[in-house]
Amino acid sequence: MDEEELQDDLRVFSGRSVLPPWLRSFPAVYLALALSSLLLLLLSSLALARVSSISSQLQQELLGQNFSDRDSFLFPCGPDSREWEYFAGNCYYFSLARLSWGRARERCRERRAQLVVIGSFPEQQFLMSRTRNERFWIGLTDENSEGKWEWVDGSDYGSAFTFWGDGEPNDSGSNEDCAHLWISGRWNDVRCSFECFFICERPLPPKPQHSQHSQHSQHSQQHSH
Ligand code: BGC
Ligand code: CA
């Protein structure tokens, strides 16, 4: 009697399995494993694709490359530069704060620009129309060697355009080593610690890449002329 019960229990126990019946055969186990690895692979490649798309979007955003043709027409100096003004291939920033010449030069550098270097009368006229008779620093100094004027970008001073006021530069008080625009836009030397407005200049950013459509319409416009 006891022996028989034991045999029955053993039969029941050995018939049990942790796996559901449909998984008890080997091919089904392999199939399930293969399917789940495939799913895992698919999900991770989807996640990777999403991450790389977000990162390239972010990069474009930072570089301003998704700036459209129309935007660049309205704001040629770039998407983050609405306070910059365009003239003849360059962008100009007219400060709203007054600083010493040295600090103004730093501010321009922080804006990936430099204190303005004036190379021609048209450029001078553009600046004058904007500065009126207010004082604005320009990128010209003789602080390295008295009387030896130097542009911040190393442009040749000697043979180039100048627009000093009458009797300037006069190094008044033997203490005037930095140049600014003043009355009628004429240049004056003044002490570098004087605080006045300043003008930064930087080249035009590269034009946005044309789509095939806009290239096509440009061509057809050229042909229609
Ligand atoms: C002079 C300038 C000088 C300035 C200093 C003016 O009266 O004409 O040459 O730089 O004073 O503030
Ligand atoms: Ca002076």
Image (tube, grey):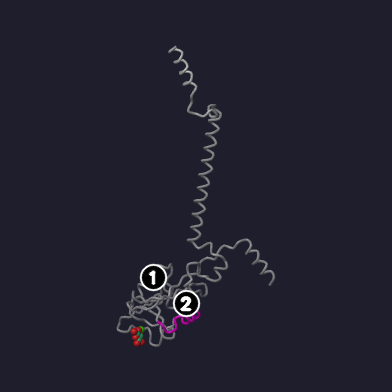
In the image, 208 versus 125, the foreground residue is: 208
Horizontally, residue 158 falls left or right of residue 68, namely left
Horizontally, residue 3 falls left or right of residue 43, namely left
The numbered mark at residue 92 is none
- The three-letter amino acid code for the residue at tag 2 is Gly
The magenta segment is: 118-134
Disc 2 + disc 1, Cβ < 8 Å: no
Residue plotted at (50% across, 80% down): 122
The reply to whether the residue tagged 1 has its Cβ within 8 angstroms of ligand 1 is no
Residue 117, quarter of the rendered image: bottom left
Magenta-colored stretch includes residue 23: no
Residue 25, quarter of the rendered image: top right
Mark 2 element type: loop
Q: Residue furthest right?
A: 224
Q: Is residue 113 above or below residue 24?
A: below
Mark 1 element type: helix
> In front: mark 2 or mark 1?
1
Residue 119 x/y as whole percent: 47, 77
Residue plotted at (43% across, 73% down): 200
Mark 2, residue position: 119
Q: Residue furthest front?
A: 1
Image quadrant in which the N terminus is located: top left
Horizontally, residue 31 falls left or right of residue 180, namely right
Mark 1, residue position: 107
